[in-house]
Amino acid sequence: MNSARLSIDATFFAELMGELARRGQGRRESGAFLLTDRAHPADTLPQPVTAVAFYDDLDPACLTGGITFHATGYTALYARCRREGLRVSGDVHTHPYQRVGQSPTDANHPMVALDGHVALIAPRYAAGVTSAAELGVHVRHRGSWTSLYGPRAAEVVQIRDDRPAKTRAPAWRQLLAHLTMPQRRHRRNR
């Protein structure tokens, strides 16, 4: 499985990881459903993630150290999806430490047990996660899971930069412009 299944804007990804870390407070797991536009054909990959629904917004009592998500949370999730024209294409939750493999609980009791669903696991309660290669990416296929890590994970979940090209100047170019401007002014004053 080398084809991209989900794509996420880089800024959106950074904000998502930051919010998961904030909600977990460095001591408990947190998570969110990854939502895509229902108008985007389900079989056209990758599916662009356009919104998230945090577990604890849907079910305020679910962050118990692990995650204990109740039926009322699913009711709220699917009501939002109907109302906003969205579908659940994946989910992400955090683990402590570096391990991003599925636990037996993750594999046997997934948040969504449908083929094609993408379950992401972020290490270190999502603190400092900056790329898809750091995630465990687990794709449901024929009732079981295919797990991908490192570069293969980043192929399946693509982080893209949607900013206009002229605002994406490399950091070295911005630094060079900043450094050369004062020097020119300084020379003129001599």
Image: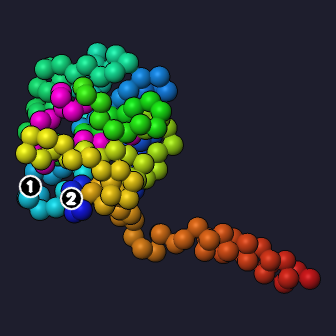
* Element under disc 1: loop
**Residue 99 visible from this viewpoint:** yes
Image quarter of the C terminus = bottom right
Q: Residue at x 29, y 35 (%)?
A: 102
Nearest the eye: 1 or 58: 1
Amino acid type assigned to the residue bearing label 1 in the image:
Ala
Q: Residue under label 2, please give it.
A: 1
Give yes or no for residue 110 being in the magenta stretch.
yes
Q: Residue at x 21, y 58 (%)?
A: 1
Q: Residue at x 22, y 63 (%)?
A: 3
> Compared with residue 16, is residue 187 higher up or lower down, i.e. above or below?
below
| Image location (x, y in percent) of residue 182 | 77, 73
What's the CA distance linking mark 2 and mark 1? 17 Å
* Element under disc 2: loop
* Image-quadrant location for residue 92: top left
Badge 1: residue crowd in 10 Å (few <14, some 14–19, many ≥20)? some
Left or right of residue 123, residue 70 in this image: left
Which segment did they paint magenta? 106-122
Looking at the image, tell me whether mark 2 or mark 1 is earlier in sequence order. Answer: 2
| Image location (x, y in percent) of residue 99 | 41, 37
Q: Give the number of callouts.
A: 2
* Image-quadrant location for residue 57: top left
Left or right of residue 10, residue 3 in this image: left
| Image location (x, y in percent) of residue 179 | 73, 72
Residue 42 image label: 1
Nearest the eye: 179 or 147: 147
